[in-house]
Amino acid sequence: MAENSATGARPDDFESRLRAAGIRITRPRKIILEILGDKADHPGAAEIYRRAQRIDPSISLATVYRTMKLLEDFGAVHRHAFDGGPSRFEVVDGDHHDHLIDLDTGKVIEFHSETIERLQEQIADELGYDIEHHRLELYGRKRRER
Amino acid sequence: MAENSATGARPDDFESRLRAAGIRITRPRKIILEILGDKADHPGAAEIYRRAQRIDPSISLATVYRTMKLLEDFGAVHRHAFDGGPSRFEVVDGDHHDHLIDLDTGKVIEFHSETIERLQEQIADELGYDIEHHRLELYGRKRRER
DNA sequence: AGACTAGTTGCAAACGATTTGCATTTGCAT
DNA sequence: ATGCAAATGCAAATCGTTTGCAACTAGTCT
Ligand SMILES: [Mn+2]
Ligand SMILES: [Mn+2]
Ligand SMILES: [Zn+2]
Ligand SMILES: [Zn+2]
């Protein structure tokens, strides 16, 4: 026992969850899951592909895309389409949060406001709607210190 | 005088504003401005192209795109990238608002919450940022009446 | 361990939205 | 009316993403 314990996050959880759902755990998928669990950033398909190739050069970009769609449909991953650039992904680990994108560096900062969430619900409600999901993205620059 | 007064909105304003900025008022641009001023919906480039062709079949899709970019840079038009679909545009006439997209019909409903806007500012401020712009999009379905 | 089969892969070609090069037109200042 | 930079239409190019297909495996059943 104790064969896999040096992994950054907990990719095992995913693998078992996927297996339980009848989804095959293949070599490419294992690698991609490991990459996604590693850093908590928001990489695009190309970046995931790059990182995956370092582990197994035979992986194809098509498989990265297919796997991301799979994980998205499975609910394990969220896809973001920030202004301009291509889709970026992140594992759905904990609670919901929204994003602030640094226009200068591209850095993505996460935040959460229960008040805003509640207001959104209220607004939708007043309009006669149930919210399925939402996007709140702030685009800004670091404040010039005085 | 009184030659152009039957136009839906006030495309004249735009034309003069553009002229003042040294931008040439060409036939395609005149037509696109007229279309944009007409309905207050959120048409995509293809839809604008379709409507424009009904007025002048010689207009090209490339020019629609070029004009939208021009107007966007000029600040006269906002580009939206709602989930999935292509970019959709709307003239910047009045005050800022956000959008609720009906997932069943694709209909776009506009709303505004001064409280949310303020909270966004506050959050960005706490993170040390100045907001340049933001996107708040609610995706939902009409509430099933009981 | 070997065989079987449906699911998965890599590759290249297809895709949809948007942009661009270029030769030809056009707006508009002179 | 003339001249020229800016704008146009067309087709080809680009970008991100998806897809068809033949070759390959994961998981299952001997
Ligand atoms: Mn995030
Ligand atoms: Mn709007
Ligand atoms: Zn939120
Ligand atoms: Zn807003």
Image (cartoon, coloured by chain):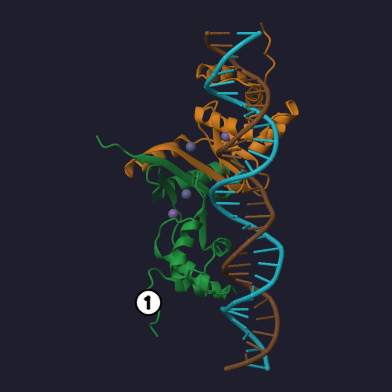
Chain colours: A green, B orange, C brown, D cyan
Label 1 Cα crowd, 10 Å radius (few <14 / some 14-19 / many 20+): few
Q: At 66% from the left edge and 5% from the top edge, which residue is drawn? A: B1
With B122 as the anchor, is B86 left or right in this view? Answer: right
The kind of residue on which mark 1 rests is Ser
Residue in the foreground of this view, choosing between B65 and B50: B65
With A4 as the anchor, is A86 left or right in this view? Answer: right
In the rendered image, the quadrant that contains the N terminus of chain A is bottom left
Q: At 73% from the left edge and 30% from the top edge, which residue is drawn? A: B53
Where residue B99 appears, x then y in whole percent? 56, 39
Q: Name which quarter of the figure residue C17 lies in.
A: top right
Q: Name which quarter of the figure residue B125 lies in.
A: top left
Where residue C6 appears, x then y in whole percent? 68, 76
Where residue B11 appears, x then y in whole percent? 61, 20
Q: Is mark 1 within 8 Å of ligand 1?
A: no
Q: Secondary structure at mark 1?
A: loop
Give the residue pinned by disc 1. Answer: A5
Rendered position, A67 above or below B59:
below
Where residue B105 appears, x then y in whole percent? 68, 45
With B118 as the anchor, is A25 left or right in this view? Answer: right
Q: Name which quarter of the figure residue A10 lies in.
A: bottom left
Rendered position, A67 above or below B69:
below
**Chain ID, mark 1:** A
Rendered position, B98 above or below B25:
below
Residue in the foreground of this view, choosing between B72 and A109: B72
Q: Is residue B34 visible?
A: yes
Tag count in the figure? 1
In the rendered image, the quadrant that contains the C terminus of chain A is top left
Residue in the foreground of this view, choosing between A61 and B33: A61
Q: Is residue A36 visible?
A: no
